[in-house]
Amino acid sequence: MRLIQIAVPEDQRTDLVEVLEDRNLGYTVTNGLVDGGDRAIISFILPADAVEYVLDDMEQRGFDTETFTVSVEAEYATFEGVDAVQDEWAKTPNRIAPETLRSKAKDLRLNTRSYLWMMILSTVIATAGLLLGSPAIVVGSMVLAPIVSPMLTGAVGAVRDDRDMVLDSLHMQGLGLGIAVIGAFLFSLLAKQFFAVPMALDIATIEVISGRFSPGMLAVVVGLASGAAGAFGLATKGQVSIVGVMIAAALIPTAAASGIGFAWGVPIVGLGSLVLLLVTIVAVNVGGVTMLSYLGYRPDEIDEGFFDLSSAREIAVLAATTAAVVLIVVAVGYGSYQQFAFERSVNSAVTDVLEGGEYEELEVTSIATEYAAAGPFSDPTTVTVTLSRTSDQSYGDLPNSFYRAIANETDEDVQVRVQYQDFDQANVSTTGTGSAALETAGTLVPMVQ
């Protein structure tokens, strides 16, 4: 529920009270002074979903919402017909007023000092969790990370034509995630220096890291969905804090993996994670803007003030920001396209090989590819194929078969690794009508049903 207070001229008082009565809302009217003039102060209670619609009705009656309008959250309210009003609006589209959306987004922001400290601390925890191979610790870092705030304020600013919100958001996103990568790099160097982890640790084989240095198509889907979910939660009664963990899950561990890769001198991990980080940032922002646009938060008219630059400094800042964003989007888009095409070709080649009759007993568990667009920074791209097999089967030529198929499909030099997950198959036979036996080395072992 929301408590709304508005200050209206006496000549509009009757018309606006009629709006409230038509909506069956509880209200009170008192006299007051606003900007030195006599005004009627109308206070009324209504569901959050109704705020935008009621204020729109009042604007049609001549009320200017920019004079004096206050909206505060109410814990409870009682007036005649309150249950009927709540039930009615519970069935309507779940959406808050644009002014409430903007205010709610700004309320998420921390001051710069608090924001940076929380980013540093969450990054340290994420880095430690990745080096330890502990998913639980990594999850803890996501809960602390405050990255959801600038992501959502940027989406709101872009949709509502608020230039200051957009520029502030881009600044905070770049600063926070830059600090995260640098912080992870420095913390990883200290961990190596003091032998907190083995210096010879092969970080690319750590499971919680290995999935974070290849910008695959599903990473884009996760970013888009996370940004859209955050925007939807912000614009409705959804839990933004919970969605914030999802957005942090897509960003903070990836930033930490990038710092670890550079600290360990493994550019393929550092660069691949950095590209994945940039891909995800773009996807989260696009997802947020798209969702808010879909929900109808675009202004009726384009705010020309968005491009109204009054000084050379403002022109330079906007031009530099625009150029940086365009450069990042183009570079990330090109790198991602290369990776998507490479992974698709690898998957196709592996499938073709396994369709041969001699490999029909094998099943694919996973296919992991390193970032394939690292150029001179890396050795041949490593492709790791994990297969399940029975323990008594051997496929000595399979890695070479994969190599030939992938090289032909991608026209790239690759290094192929094949991992097996062995299992033993039980030989079960049925005897009689209601009992089963397990046959092992010629001995029948009864199984109780």
Image: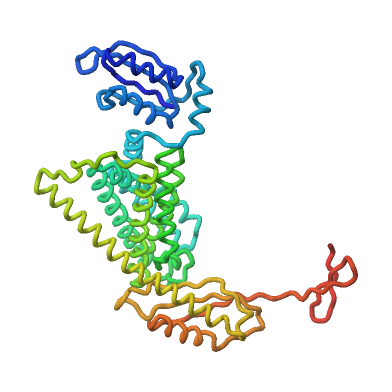
Residue 290 position, x and y percent, is 36, 50
Residue 176 position, x and y percent, is 30, 52
Q: Image height check: is 125 above or below 272?
A: above
Locate the C terminus and report the quarter of the image it occupies: bottom right
Q: Residue at x 57, y 77 (%)?
A: 420
Residue 366 position, x and y percent, is 53, 71
Q: Please tell me which residue lies in front, 154 or 191.
A: 154
The residue sitting at the right extreme is 432
Residue 347 position, x and y percent, is 48, 75
Q: Residue at x 60, y 75 (%)?
A: 363
Q: Residue at x 28, y 47 (%)?
A: 169
The residue sitting at the top extreme is 31
Locate the N terminus and report the quarter of the image it occupies: top left
Q: Tally the marks.
A: 0
Image quadrant in which you'd find residue 29:
top left
Q: Please tell me which residue lies in front, 410 or 295.
A: 295
Q: Image height check: is 287 above or below 45?
A: below
The residue sitting at the front extreme is 60
Q: Please tell me which residue lies in front, 438 or 332.
A: 332
Q: Residue at x 13, y 50 (%)?
A: 315
Q: In this view, does 94 lie to the left or right of 274?
A: right
The answer to whether residue 34 shows anywhere in this view is: yes
Question: What sort of colour scheme is used for the picture?
Answer: rainbow
Q: In this view, does 255 lie to the left or right of 326?
A: right
Image quadrant in which you'd find residue 319:
bottom left
Q: Image height check: is 432 above or below 13?
A: below
Q: Image height check: is 305 above or below 128?
A: above
Q: Is residue 178 left or right of residue 392?
A: left
The answer to whether residue 189 shows anywhere in this view is: no
